[in-house]
Image (tube, grey):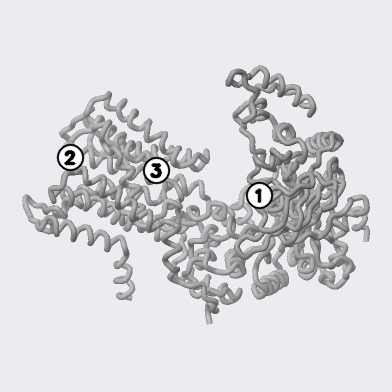
């Protein structure tokens, strides 16, 4: 039993994360140094957790969508909308909890909208979510009336920059969210149904799975996660920037999910591994930053990583690598 | 080489894909001014032969001969220059361009290098008039019915080619009046000396329009004959092969007292898919469904299960009227359905054998009462054993299993839901002998346990062996219900061909 869980840990994503961290350590010997200061931890490693949290949260929502053979391009824009809602509401004098709940509800509705386009109107996910990707920033700009809305509300700022037991609040939220979502999809049948719909929607419908409800659920979750990330980012900069909040983060989230081993063709998925994927991306970003390379390298390295992951997932690679279990004829239970 | 009088001829065509022989020394001759039907079940090689005649494929061996001279057809455009035009089942024109543009695309009349739209539309009007179409040539093609689009496609093919017209299932999505209209046009073209190849699954249409027929089976030429000397029964027998007809070898199960009525379909049907049918199904009986491919067998199964929703008629389950418009309705009533296309609609290739078996039961239980892994293992193991599913592990992806074991897993999926009624569409197609026997055994066992089953199969011997009753589908219509002890595959063949001379028995 112990051996099996150890083997489970030795998966490619965790090895890759360890690899990236070790490379960072070679380039920047102080990488693993963590200090305690003002009641919280400091260090590059903590920075990876903190900076990686928004994309990790997006990935928690995105992984379900991608497992159903879909994609959600709107999450970056939904972050901006949620940030704008929370910021304008606290500036207008509403208490922070109400502003946060309102922002979460708006995010949920954005996700539901995507879900309706995909599940009920049968629009291809990439186009359906492109609508909100474009419109969302416009909506955010309307809410903020074109300004960067700054605020001083301590609760919102705590969500973005505070710490809990010494760890950055953003990372704690990402961890809790990951655990809740993992438990929900794996302790109920939802995870199995998501995989079934992603592998073969026609067969799923004939097997009596309500695939429409399921799609509404995963897109709504993705919207909700985007809203959480949006609130964190707004709290971090103490303001809502409709133009730049969450800009291009949908692509990082998709990349995180793909690195986490979920195929864009749908099917098998893992929420924790998608989070690990987000940490790998952030570890590379932080590594390039602290080791003194120009940040332009970031994009090149990221592109190289995408290329490697896609090659590993390509049909060519699966042809080259022999299947691990051979279809040997053998009585099942004897 | 003697002058054959053929407009288009294929001689000794062999086509090999990998190590699969799709066509084996097939000869095919097409005379000017004839309508020549090309028949065969799926996989017989019809479409491969058509693709060779239109230049889409190159033959491995053999010659394509146009007007007595061997030619090499590089692609369909090249074949057009030899006068060979094709119209496919799915109209492959541009629905968002005008009718005239579709007629002349790539060949527009020009005026100093610009498309002369006026002339094009004027010409188009004349051409369409010849086909009895009075529509505005500048209107969008997509705005017209499929039948009109089909005629435009034919007009284009004839205008561009003009010697040979190949029609690949042109009537599959037309209603009866539209088919008649199409046939009038085909008769006109025939009178003009065009050679027409006509591919269809509808035997009535073959007898209505064709002069000669060529039958393929498993890539081999069975025969080319004039239809004057053939009955429908002869044609069906040639298509299905095996001289089973009138052998009288196997008999239906002896008449047993029928169980209570479980299902009653009355006037149940769906437009353009299945004509309304009446069917009563009792507990503890197997209703076999026979019919050629495309006869509406699968469509009937799908509306019974709610995979497509019926638009007329009523259904009652155990005496209570109900409505079945989606699979979840059917499953709630205890139905199960093993679809014909196992790979596309049956299995979840990347999921494990275990998950494939429990999924329908889990679907019935809903999102929140999840089976634990141990429960899943127990259920999958139980059926793995009783159905003899041969897999190295129940956790391996089902796509690695053989077709027969996949089929057993899908059957197990429904048995796990404790069904009262199962619909099996071609449950034994493409599986090995051992799995075949296991599935036939299971069908018999389930009937004895009191389940109601509808089993669709092209294997007549097999249908006769396990069915309590047989219904015959032809041209989307339930045309005969065969009961009694004197029924054998021969009678079924006759019923498939033409129920009028078969069913009174």
The residue where tag 2 is placed is A157
Q: Earlier in the sequence, mark 2 or mark 3?
A: 3
In front: label 2 or label 3: 3
Question: What x and y, as percent, mark residue A220?
Answer: 40, 43
CB contact under 8 Å: marks 3 and 1: no
Judge whether A124 appears above or below B138 on screen.
Answer: below
What mark, if any, has residue A72 been given in the picture? 3
- Let me know if marks 3 and 1 both belong to one chain: no
Residue positioned 43% across, 37% down in the render: A113
- The picture quadrant where one finds residue B297 is bottom right
* Secondary element at tag 2: helix
Q: Residue at x 33, y 49 (%)?
A: A255
Q: Pinpoint residue B280: horizontal percent, then vertical percent.
A: 78, 56
| Quarter residue A315 falls in | bottom left
The answer to which of A254 and B416 lies nearer the viewer is: A254
Q: CA distance from mark 2 to mark 1?
A: 55 Å
Residue B280 visible (yes or no): no
Whole-angstrom CA distance, mark 2 to mark 3, is: 28 Å
What residue is shown with label 1?
Answer: B324
Query: Badge 3, how many Cα within 10 Å: few under 14, some, many 20+?
Result: many
Q: Residue B202, how many percent across, how many down?
A: 79, 48
Report which quarter residue B215 is drawn in. Answer: bottom right
Q: Is residue B444 left or right of residue B6?
A: left
Q: Is residue A268 above or below residue B117?
A: below
The answer to whether one can see residue A282 in this image is yes
The residues tagged by marks 3 and 1 sit, at their Cα atoms, a distance apart of 34 Å
Residue at disc 1, secondary structure = loop
Q: Using the image, determine if residue B335 lies above or below residue A112.
A: below
Question: The C terminus of chain B is located in which quarter?
Answer: bottom right
């Amino acid at each position: 039993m112990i051996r099996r869980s150890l083997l489970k840990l030795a998966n490619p994503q965790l090895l890759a994360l360890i690899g990236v961290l070790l490379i960072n350590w070679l380039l920047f010997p102080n990488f693993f140094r963590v200090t305690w200061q003002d009641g919280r931890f400091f260090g590059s490693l903590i920075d990876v957790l903190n900076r990686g949290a928004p994309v990790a949260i997006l990935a928690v929502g995105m992984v379900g969508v991608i497992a159903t053979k879909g994609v959600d391009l709107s999450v970056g824009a939904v972050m901006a909308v949620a940030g704008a809602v929370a910021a304008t509401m606290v500036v207008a004098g509403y208490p922070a909890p109400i502003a946060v709940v309102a922002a979460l509800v708006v995010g949920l509705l954005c996700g539901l909208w995507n879900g309706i386009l995909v599940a009920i109107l049968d629009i291809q996910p990439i186009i359906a979510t492109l609508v909100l990707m474009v419109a969302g920033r416009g909506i955010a700009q309307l809410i903020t009336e074109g300004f960067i809305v700054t605020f001083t509300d301590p609760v919102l700022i705590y969500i973005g920059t505070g710490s809990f037991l010494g760890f950055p609040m953003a990372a704690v939220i990402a961890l809790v969210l990951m655990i809740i979502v993992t438990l929900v999809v794996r302790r109920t049948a939802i995870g199995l149904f998501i995989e079934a719909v992603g592998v073969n929607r026609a067969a799923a419908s004939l097997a009596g799975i309500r695939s429409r409800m399921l799609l509404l659920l995963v897109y709504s979750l993705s919207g909700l996660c985007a809203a959480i990330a949006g609130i964190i980012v707004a709290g971090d900069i103490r303001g809502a920037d409709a133009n730049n909040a969450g800009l291009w983060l949908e692509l990082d989230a998709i990349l995180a999910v793909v690195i986490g081993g979920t195929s864009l063709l749908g099917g098998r998925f893992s929420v924790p591994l998608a989070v690990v994927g987000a940490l790998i991306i952030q570890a590379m970003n932080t590594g390039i930053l602290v080791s003194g390379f120009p940040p332009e390298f970031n994009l090149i390295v990221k592109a190289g990583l995408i290329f490697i992951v896609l090659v590993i997932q390509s049909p060519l690679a699966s042809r080259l690598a022999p299947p691990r279990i051979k279809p040997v004829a053998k009585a099942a239970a004897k | 080489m003697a002058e054959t009088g053929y407009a288009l001829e294929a001689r000794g065509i062999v086509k090999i894909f990998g190590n699969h022989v799709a066509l084996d020394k097939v000869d095919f001759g097409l005379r000017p001014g004839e309508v020549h039907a090309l028949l065969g079940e799926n996989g017989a090689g019809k479409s491969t032969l058509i693709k060779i005649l239109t230049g889409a494929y190159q033959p491995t061996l053999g010659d394509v001969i146009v007007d007595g001279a061997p030619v090499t057809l590089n692609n369909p455009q090249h074949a057009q220059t030899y006068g060979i035009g094709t119209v496919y089942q799915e109209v492959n024109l541009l629905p968002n361009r005008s009718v005239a543009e579709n007629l002349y695309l790539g060949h527009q009349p020009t005026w100093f290098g610009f498309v002369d739209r006026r002339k094009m539309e004027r010409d188009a009007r004349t051409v369409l008039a010849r086909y009895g179409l009075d529509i505005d040539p500048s209107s969008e093609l997509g705005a017209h019915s499929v039948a009109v689009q089909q005629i435009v496609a034919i007009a284009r093919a004839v205008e561009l080619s003009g010697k040979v017209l190949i029609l690949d299932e042109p009537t599959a999505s037309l209603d009866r009046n539209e088919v008649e209209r199409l046939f009038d046009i085909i008769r006109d073209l025939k009178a003009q000396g065009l050679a027409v190849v006509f591919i269809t699954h509808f035997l009535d249409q073959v007898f209505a329009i064709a002069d000669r027929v060529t039958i393929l089976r498993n890539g081999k030429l069975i025969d080319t004959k004039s239809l004057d000397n053939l009955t429908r029964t002869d044609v069906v027998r040639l298509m299905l092969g095996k001289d089973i007809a009138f052998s009288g070898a196997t008999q239906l199960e002896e008449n047993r007292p029928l169980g209570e009525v479980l299902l009653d379909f009355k006037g149940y049907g769906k437009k353009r898919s299945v004509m309304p049918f009446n069917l009563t199904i009792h507990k503890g009986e197997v209703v076999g469904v026979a019919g050629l491919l495309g006869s509406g067998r699968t469509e009937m199964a799908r509306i019974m299960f709610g995979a497509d929703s019926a638009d007329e008629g009523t259904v009652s389950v155990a005496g209570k009227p109900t409505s079945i418009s989606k699979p979840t309705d059917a499953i709630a009533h205890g139905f199960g359905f093993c679809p014909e296309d196992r790979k596309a609609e049956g299995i979840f290739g990347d999921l494990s054998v275990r998950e494939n078996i429990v999924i329908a039961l889990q679907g019935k239980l809903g999102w929140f009462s999840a089976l634990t892994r141990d429960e899943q293992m127990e259920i999958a193991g139980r059926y793995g054993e009783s159905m003899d599913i041969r897999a190295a592990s129940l956790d391996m992806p089902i796509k690695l299993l053989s077709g027969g074991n996949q089929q057993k897993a899908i059957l197990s999926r429904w048995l796990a839901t404790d069904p009262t009624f199962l619909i099996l569409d071609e449950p034994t197609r493409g599986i090995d002998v051992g799995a075949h026997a296991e599935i036939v055994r299971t069908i018999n066992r389930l009937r004895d346990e009191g389940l109601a089953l509808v089993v669709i199969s092209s294997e007549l011997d097999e249908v006769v062996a396990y069915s309590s009753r047989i219904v015959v589908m032809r041209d989307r219509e339930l045309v005969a219900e065969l009961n009694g002890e004197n029924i054998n595959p021969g009678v079924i063949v006759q019923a498939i061909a033409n129920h009028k001379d078969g069913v009174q028995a």
